[in-house]
Image (cartoon, grey):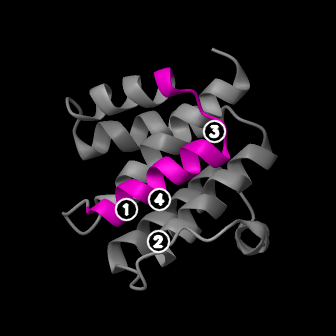
Amino acid sequence: MDNLEKYHRGLLYLIHLIISADGVIDEDELYALESIQKHENASDSIYDEFMDDVENLSEREIYEKGIDLISECTVAHQTRAFAWLIKLSESDGEVHPKEVRFLLYSVKKAGVNFDDVVEIAKTLPSLEN
């Protein structure tokens, strides 16, 4: 698996955790997930495999898979992944406390500079449907 594929797969797993943080995945969140997939040029096969995989994994397993994949990426890809997660958490107009804890913990665990993540997030397109 090359670095770009690790980035795409890791990003999708982490996105899933953000959109399911409140216990419900709505249409707008699925739209945002697919929008990020398209913006990042993640292949449909990666997306399809991811969708099949998350159905059989616990939240903890999804997190570990996502973090493990992202931690193998370049710092630029790590920073961009977390920037997408910030955009995603803001897209429904309400940031859930579990999303905030998840983001802060994950950024710290990955060793990425949070200020850099915020700056990249400002450059990404809106995810509102």
Tell me the quarter of the picture where residue 20 sits. bottom left
The structure residue drawn at horizontal position 48% and vertical position 42%, both measured from the top left corner, is 12
84 relative to 18 in the view: left or right: right
Q: CA distance from mark 3 to mark 1?
A: 24 Å
Query: 27 and 64: which one is in front?
Result: 27
Q: Amino acid at mark 3?
A: Ser
Residue 11 spot, x, y in % from top left: 54, 44
Q: CA distance from mark 1 to mark 4?
A: 5 Å
Comparing labels 3 and 1, the label whose residue is closer to the camera: 1
Q: Which residue is mark 2?
A: 89
Q: Which residue is mark 4?
A: 32
Q: Amino acid at mark 1?
A: Glu
Comparing labels 2 and 3, the label whose residue is closer to the camera: 2
Vertical arrangement, residue 27 with respect to residue 123, above or below: above
Asked whether disc 1 touches disc 2, contact meaning CB atoms under 8 Å apart, the reply is: no
Q: Earlier in the sequence, mark 4 or mark 3?
A: 4
Tell me the quarter of the picture where residue 21 sits. bottom left
Vertical arrangement, residue 27 with respect to residue 54, above or below: below
Q: Which residue is mark 3?
A: 71
Q: Secondary structure at mark 1?
A: helix
| Magenta stretch contains residue 32 | yes
Q: CA distance from mark 1 to mark 2?
A: 9 Å
Comparing labels 4 and 3, the label whose residue is closer to the camera: 4
Task: Give neighbour class at mark 2: few <14, some 14-19, many 20+ (Cα, 10 Å).
Answer: many
Asked whether disc 3 touches disc 1, contact meaning CB atoms under 8 Å apart, the reply is: no
Asked whether disc 1 touches disc 4, contact meaning CB atoms under 8 Å apart, the reply is: yes
Query: 69 and 11: which one is in front?
Result: 11
